[in-house]
Amino acid sequence: MNASAPWKTRVTAYLAHRRAHGFELIFADGQLQAFARFADAQGPAPHLTVALAMAWARTARRPHPLTWARRIEVLRGFAQYWRRWDPATEIPPRNLFGPAHRRLVPHIFTEAELITLLQATATLTPQNGLRPATCRCVFGLLAASGLRISEALALTTSDVDLTAGVLSIRAGKFQKPRLVPLHPSTTAALVVYARQRDTVRPQPVCDRFFVRDDGRPADALALRYAMQVLCSRLGWVARGDYPYHRLHDHRHTFIVRSLLRSYEQGVAIDHAVLALSTYVGHARITDTYWYLTGIPELMSLAGERFRRYAEEVSS
């Protein structure tokens, strides 16, 4: 590999090398391509330096040290690889902008908020179209099952068994398929939506379960926009570290409130978390713990359990 090659060529070689070893690099691909465009636009720059890395990291659209740190994290792998051909390559320090991974606190919806949000979908336009019904059903499904939005929107009509009340998730994260049994009330809501969808769009142009008014697949961008519009109309301010309500907050909410119910029912928490981790399609149980947020109800129950434990130990 020529050490004076354009940065785009160098990045392409690195990505091909990593993919040949089984890495998908979806996030890294976009970031490193952006770095290559930036570095090539700077003019002759034969070596990767810490100064060049910092300058590129700070061009992120979200001007936040966490974003910069994640860019540096991606660039470090490329720098270690490129050092084979260019010993003058500088590897950016790991904590140049602080830690690259910090858990941002999500918004955990209360039951009252979820009910209000679903009711508010009736105000979306066109009121005689599919948009209000699709938004209501998708929001409700996310809240009731903890699905990822990508999983919900990838469902086809054959993936949704309305008789058994079971979803077949084929496009899970890491291509990990699973079956998701639903509460009867959730299945009933899907049945109502399917009837309305087939009435409004008797001949859709796709086989997706959730569709738009034109019969094409519902998309996450439009659903996210609709939810943020509704939350704004309701005068809600997101709790936590994000400036707005996210579709992914429903997944966080489902996991937290599922654990809360386990506490309330006296279920062994270790067993409950393991079952929950399987249900939501996590590869590791630690991923499920990552989703937990200390809402007041959960902390109160956990505190009471610890009090009883401490009293038993001291007696």
Image (spheres, grey):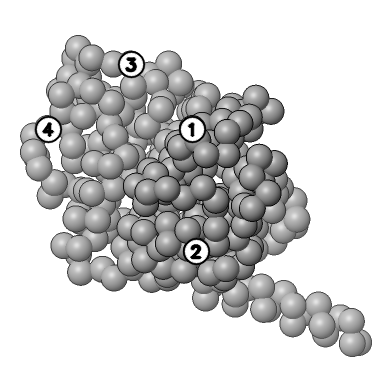
The percent coordinates of residue 296 (x first, y second) are: 52, 76
Q: CA distance from mark 4 to mark 3?
A: 19 Å
Q: Secondary structure at mark 4?
A: loop
Q: Residue at x 55, y 58 (%)?
A: 49
Q: Residue at x 42, y 62 (%)?
A: 55
Assess whether mark 4 and mark 1 are in contact (beta carbons under 8 angstroms): no
Judge depth for marks 4 and 3 and give the one in front: 3
Reading the image, the residue beneath label 1 is 9
Q: CA distance from mark 3 to mark 1?
A: 40 Å
**Location of the N terminus (image quadrant):** top right
The front one of 267 and 292 is: 292
The percent coordinates of residue 127 (x first, y second) are: 9, 40
- Count neighbours of disc 4 (C-alpha within 10 A) and say few if under 14, some if 14 to 19, many if 20 or more: some
The kind of residue tagged 1 is Thr
Q: Residue at x 45, y 37 (%)?
A: 6
The kind of residue tagged 4 is Gly
Q: Earlier in the sequence, mark 4 or mark 2?
A: 2
Reading the image, the residue beneath label 4 is 129
